[in-house]
Image (cartoon, helix red, strand yellow):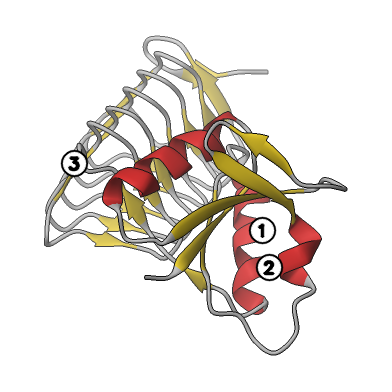
């Protein structure tokens, strides 16, 4: 059984590590942080990130980034791939993922989340607790679908975008890159790159 490194040591990293422990694929689970000395978070040891990034002679561990910030998560994902570690996907045992959905390397699907048939999920994506990604959705790299959010069938979400808690996106709507959809928003029309939208129905902020 391989070892798993979860990059990060905050709340989201704990959620990812907890799910990974329930999956049971890894011999050990270790969190990585930008710290000067090892410490402990719950049942998991935390090591300085440099201990892994400075190893020589190749890497044999698996990793997933447990950081909530989308842009940072994607950068760290790309960095650790370049170091030679293997990016893995962690799916909580209480999640539902269609066997005909595709999950990119380094993505995380939390408890009670649903990813339906023919959904395409990119790398380093988070489908958080009880979120729903319906059939034929396309999520680019670094996207986060927050707890309780719902994407109707055929929705597209661009790189590094966040769909906030309990937001709803109408079917076949396209959301651009680096977008923030506020909590509880109802998105009925397309949203351009870099926009922030809030409200019911969703409107541009600022």
- Point out residue 137 in the picture as x, y percentages from the top left corner: 26, 49
- Identified at 37% across, 25% down, the residue is 147
Q: Which residue is mark 1?
A: 76
Q: Nearer the viewer, residue 195 or 45?
A: 45
Q: Which residue is mark 2?
A: 79
Q: Residue 134 — which label?
A: 3
- Identified at 31% across, 22% down, the residue is 148
- Point out residue 29 in the picture as x, y percentages from the top left corner: 50, 53
Determine crowd level at label 1: few under 14, some 14-19, many 20+ residues with C-alpha closer than 10 A.
Answer: some
Residue 144 appears in the rendering = no
- Identified at 15% across, 47% down, the residue is 116
Q: Nearer the viewer, residue 153 or 193?
A: 153
Residue 91 appears in the rendering = yes
- Identified at 52% across, 41% down, the residue is 161
| In contact (CB < 8 Å): disc 1 and disc 2 | yes
- Point out residue 143 in the picture as x, y percentages from the top left corner: 48, 46
Secondary structure of the residue carrying tag 3 is loop
Residue 196 sits above or below residue 1 on the image: above
């Amino acid at each position: 059984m391989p070892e798993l490194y979860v990059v990060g040591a905050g709340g989201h990293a704990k959620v990812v590590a907890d799910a990974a422990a329930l999956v049971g694929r890894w011999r050990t689970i270790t969190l990585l942080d930008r710290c000067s000395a090892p410490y402990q978070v719950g049942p998991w040891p935390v090591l300085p990130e440099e201990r892994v990034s400075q190893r020589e002679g190749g890497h044999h561990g698996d990793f997933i980034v447990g950081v909530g910030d989308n842009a940072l998560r994607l950068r760290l994902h790309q960095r650790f791939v370049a170091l030679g570690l293997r990016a893995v996907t962690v799916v909580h045992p209480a999640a539902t993922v269609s066997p005909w959905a595709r999950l990119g390397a380094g993505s995380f699907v939390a408890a009670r989340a649903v990813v339906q048939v023919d959904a395409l999920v990119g790398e380093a994506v988070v489908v958080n607790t009880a979120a729903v990604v319906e059939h034929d959705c396309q999520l680019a790299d670094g996207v986060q679908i927050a707890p309780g959010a719902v994407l109707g069938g055929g929705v597209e979400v661009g790189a590094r975008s966040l769909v906030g808690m309990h937001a709803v996106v109408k079917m076949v709507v396209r959301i651009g890159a680096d977008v923030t959809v506020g909590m509880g928003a109802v998105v009925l029309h397309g949203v351009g790159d870099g926009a922030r939208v809030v409200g019911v129905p969703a409107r541009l902020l600022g």
